Amino acid sequence: MVGTKYLIIGGGLAGGSAFRAIRQTDPEGRLTLVTEEPYPPYDRVPLSKTYLLGKFSRERLFLLRPQDLDPGRTEIRTRTRAVGLDLGSRTVTLDSGELIRFDRVLLAAGGRPRRLNIPGADLPGIYYLRTIDDSDAIRAEAQPGRRAVIVGGSFIGCEAAVALHQLGVQVTIFEVEPLLFGRVFDPTVARALTGFIRSKGIAVETGASIVRFIERGGRVGGVELADGRLYEADFAVVGIGIALNTELAEAAGLEVQDGVVVDESLRASVEGVFAAGDIARYSSPIYGRRLRVEHYDTAVKQGRRAGLNLAGQVGPYDALPYFFSYLLEVNLHVVGDFSRWDAVLQTGEPNFPEPYVRYYFEDRRLAAVLMVNTPPASLPAAEAYVRDRLTVAELWSRASPELPVPSADLEPR
């Protein structure tokens, strides 16, 4: 059995950010990171965007620098899965059978792609975009004139569709909901995004349920919809969300409710155990409730905060939820949590790529701001407004040129 002061389970953004924070805070304590992937921690965000387009080098994906990797005090175990966690003995069992004893542990295992369970789902030429190797394989398929089926009309599906379209692939997006992004945004925004993507020559089939993949020449050759329609394709990309990797935590006796339940400092119910990133359901001091956020900014900031906390610099995680997406000429940013909004203000009707701002309110307090193609200064302004949970009157009094606020009454949901 080997021992380590700090153990990180997971090699994504949260795990990599925690690794750096621990090493910067405690350069002496032994630090071990375990990841199932063949690579050290890296950034997944470009995989569906610039990396898929060939405009972002592989080297730039990786989070750790040579100076972060002192072989005497740090160890990254790739191609390694943690299969057992004993919080009483402070040990983790690896898939090799080896035990690692730890003092403090961070659970940052993220999630795995949800798989389609329909006939033909195991045919060659069907891809799930989660890893570097996935993006590389899709890029190899993306030759001009080929046809691609995209299953799922949220961020991964639409970002991949846009990238493939730019590479000259004939793309069709299939979404079971009535609109793209229908599970993320309200109908006003989802409708505008759906119309924008269609306007760029990308085919969109909404309300479309795929019942099987068609085989042609020993690999995927298309899809069949529930209404009997057939669509031919040379390859397919599936992006229908992730399943959280919380099994290890649950088996260890930690509280799991759509994520590992942690407090404001990302601590679980057992001393010395933390969670960050996609799997963390944390207590937000800003909203007074638990949130779980599956986005880049949260993974980075939670990973850093958790790393500092593991190393003894304990503080709350009080960052606002924030996410972004780039879809051709649409640069979209959202600050705050709009899962419970009940009224809005908006700067006219959305007509992308024209600039647009939408303010979401909960109990007459600002909860989130959606910005499309606004200047860079609008982002810190929105963060300040949301953090202070402004009323409409307070918002009007603090409005800035970078972030217009319409003079209108709140529109109920």
Image (cartoon, grey):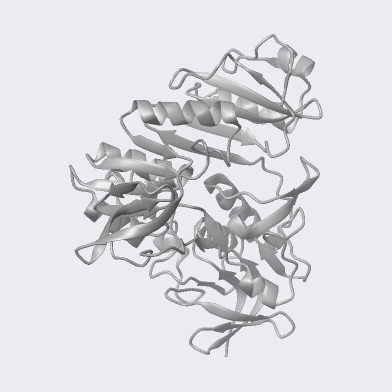
Q: Is residue 28 visible?
A: no
Seen as rendered, the residue at the extreme top is 407
Q: Is residue 410 left or right of residue 205?
A: right
Q: Is residue 266 visible?
A: yes
Q: Residue at x 36, y 31 (%)?
A: 328
Of residues 313 and 92, the one nearer the viewer is 92
Instruction: Point out residue 305 in the picture as x, y percentages from the top left corner.
Output: 65, 54
Q: Is residue 286 left or right of residue 179?
A: right
Q: Is residue 82 above or below residue 59?
A: below
Instruction: Point out residue 288 in the picture as x, y percentages from the top left corner.
Output: 81, 44
Q: Is residue 117 above or below residue 175?
A: below
Tell me where residue 219 sits by quadrant: bottom left
Of residues 374 and 196, the one nearer the viewer is 196
Q: Residue at x 45, y 17 (%)?
A: 354
Q: Is residue 49 above or below residue 373?
A: below
Q: Quadrant of the N terminus?
A: bottom right
Q: Is residue 259 left or right of residue 226?
A: right
Of residues 224 and 387, the one nearer the viewer is 224
Of residues 191 and 216, the one nearer the viewer is 216
Instruction: Point out residue 51 in the picture as x, y percentages from the top left corner.
Output: 32, 48
